[in-house]
Amino acid sequence: MGGPMNFTPSSRTEWMAAACAVASGLLLSTVFAPLEWTWAAGVALVPLLAMARRVPARMALKMGFTAGFLFWLLSIRWLTHVTVMGWIGLSAYCALYLLPAAWMANRWRGGAAGFAAALAVVWCGSEFLRGWIGGGFPWNPLGAGLTPWLPGIQLAEFGGVWLVSGLAIFVNALLAWAVAERRGWTSLAACALAVAVVLGWGAWRAEQLPKPARSIRVALVQTSIPQDEKWVTAKILMIYERLADLTRKAQGDPDVELVIWPETALPDDVRNSENSYAVVWNLCTNGTPILTGSLDLAVLDSGEEQYFNSAFLFDTSGRIVGEYDKRHLVIGGEFIPFERWIPWRLQAALGLPASLSAGGEGAVFRAGKADIPLSPLICFEDILPYLARADVRAGARMLVNLTNDAWFDERVAPRQHMRNAILRAVENRVPLVRSANTGVTCVIEPSGRVVARLSDGEGRTWGEGVLWADVPVPPDGAPLTFYARFGDMYGIACAVATVLWLATATWKRRKRPEGI
């Protein structure tokens, strides 16, 4: 047997590094629901970035992963309602995207302004890559944490959410430099002044947006059906009755021009279900068109069945006058990767659901007295900037999110979802309305301001009910924003710069090893 094991006690520097990483991870988590401490977005990374400059590169990378892993564990803990292993694995994966920023903070040898700019580029490039690689998981970019503060998010009309994240990181980096270096005060002051000018413009821009002359009055229905009851045969009648009761309540306002139901509001395929179609027909023929989420079924010539997560617009005669199939499916929930290569016996043993099929393109519907062009986004599609942008470029002047967050908890996931969606309105300067099964059902102005929200009066947003709202909509010929015209130029440029820098820095270290 060998001798006793020798343990080397951690140094003071290692303890400080660990404490700073944990502090940044905790602060980052407070930016998002349930706490939503918006101010923390400007300081959350200061401990990590400042300490990363004082430790070896390997320790800086460990700090970045620790902070990221803790942040993601806390911020997406609602995923445990579906999968604990998925929660841990996804948190570890997303934590990797904090490593480039930690390494940049450690390696930078220039001045304060360059430090802040370089970190903003690397951080935004990493966020963009996280939202793109493997289908993407663009959840909770730092810019989404600024949505309660309108002056901070108006830059989205130029560079999308990535530019808003860049602004937050720029501030964090300036503060971290002041803490770690205590020099370059002139440059720091100039950068701080530039940030103040940007925020001043943001405050002005949010108040000076044009007021559209046309509007549409909508009634947003929130059914609040628990996820474990949505597909139970014994609950179908209850679902029909709730939809009917809430819709008749909505139609009690004679000025309503469109009733909107949430994602998969109906318990089956409305196109081929006599019962579901009868429910819709009886309600929309009362004089109000209905936009609803539903499954859809297509049978190929081969006899193979394809299911879609869809949205249908019914006119007042009960005809389908608009249909849309969800383009971006959720991995694990709506499709199983490599399903065709998994033996059917194994699929049955594991209880794997059949995968849905993805739609090919967006759709623009016309609704209301003013013939408003609107586009539906289903489920998490409203957190994907490129989808909303494509719809606006196709002519939509209002975005409609039909969603169902009942898979998760009642408080955290729905609120985070809404915060992520707000940037789509600002990026394209169009209103966004959301009809959710369990909240948050709301109306968002082009400035990013939430002007109406379904609530029970005590802050609870997940109960059943109806939200009526007059939604001003820009004219069809309204000019597109810079972001709508040119897309993710900033995010792509940051991603390319980040990848090139990582490749160059890694090659140099391998050529002249310094012992990280």
Image (cartoon, grey):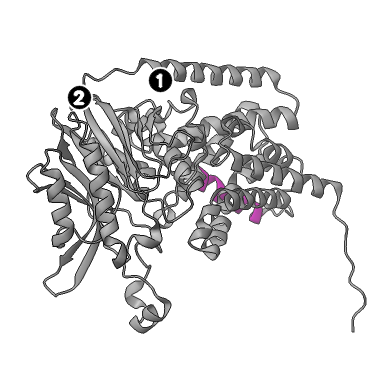
Kindly identify the residue that appears in the image at 89 percent across and 71 percent down.
5
Residues in magenta?
A: 497-511
Pick the front one: 189 or 92: 92
Quadrant in the picture for residue 365: top left
Q: Amino acid at mark 2?
A: Pro
Q: Residue 58 in the image: x percent, y percent?
A: 71, 52
**Could you say whether the residue bearing mark 2 is in a helix, strand or loop?**
loop
Please state, as top left, top right, bottom left or bottom right, where the N terminus lies in the image: bottom right
Against 199, residue 334 (above or below) is below
Kindly identify the residue that appears in the image at 64 percent across and 38 percent down.
45
Distance of label 1 from label 2 (alpha carbons) = 19 Å
- Identify the residue under disc 1: 206
Q: Is residue 453 left or right of residue 81?
A: left
Q: Earlier in the sequence, mark 1 or mark 2?
A: 1
Disc number placed over residue 475 in the picture, else none: 2
Any part of residue 363 in sight: no
**Could you say whether the residue bearing mark 1 is in a helix, strand or loop?**
helix
Q: Residue 395 in the image: x percent, y percent?
A: 19, 35
Against 481, residue 315 (above or below) is below
Kindly identify the residue that appears in the image at 55 percent across and 63 percent down.
84
Q: Are marks 1 and 2 in contact (CB under 8 Å)?
A: no
Membership of 508 in magenta stretch: yes
Q: Residue 91 in the image: x percent, y percent?
A: 56, 55
Kindly identify the residue that appears in the image at 55 percent across and 65 percent down.
85
Membership of 433 in magenta stretch: no
